[in-house]
Amino acid sequence: KRYPEEARRKGARGTVRISFTINSSGHVTGSRLVGSSGEPSLDREVRAMLGRAAPFPPIPEAMRRSSLSLTVPINFSMR
């Protein structure tokens, strides 16, 4: 994760919640923000972060699933 310079200058912090679905090969097939931080640059960074992280490892065959949906909180705070 990268702390956007715009948010850093403002001292902005917050938590963004993103939901996304991956297919069996680990590719993201859909995503949406389900909780905004209130700071647009932080929200944009979470979308960009998901793009940089993809593709994910394939879903293990033992799970017997063709897709997997997750909701993840991403916290931004300055120390």
Image (tube, rainbow, N blue to C red):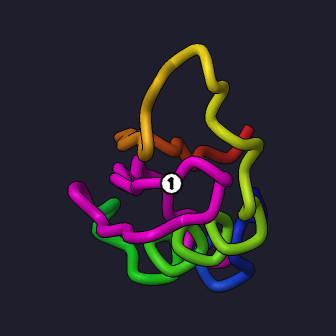
Residue at the image position 59 percent from the left and 14 percent from the top: 62
- Which image quadrant: the N terminus? bottom right
Q: In this view, does 8 lie to the left or right of 39?
A: right
Secondary structure at numbered mark 1: strand
Q: What stretch is highlighted in magenta?
A: 8-35
Q: What is the number of callouts on the image?
A: 1
Q: Does the magenta stretch include residue 9?
A: yes
- Place of residue 19 in the rendered image (x, y in percent of width and height, measured from the top left): 34, 53
* 71 w.r.t. 56: above or below: above
Nearer-the-camera pick, 17 or 28: 28
Q: In this view, does 44 lie to the left or right of 37?
A: right
Residue at the image position 51 percent from the left and 18 percent from the top: 63
- Place of residue 45 in the rendered image (x, y in percent of width and height, measured from the top left): 60, 73
- Which image quadrant: the C terminus? top right
Residue at the image position 22 percent from the left and 57 percent from the top: 34
Magenta segment, prevailing SS (helix, strand or loop): strand
- Place of residue 2 in the rendered image (x, y in percent of width and height, measured from the top left): 77, 64
The residue to which callout 1 is attached is 22
Q: In this view, does 46 lie to the left or right of 39?
A: right
- Place of residue 61 in the rendered image (x, y in percent of width and height, measured from the top left): 63, 25
Residue at the image position 30 percent from the left and 65 percent from the top: 33
* 19 w.r.t. 6: above or below: above
Nearer-the-camera pick, 10 or 31: 31
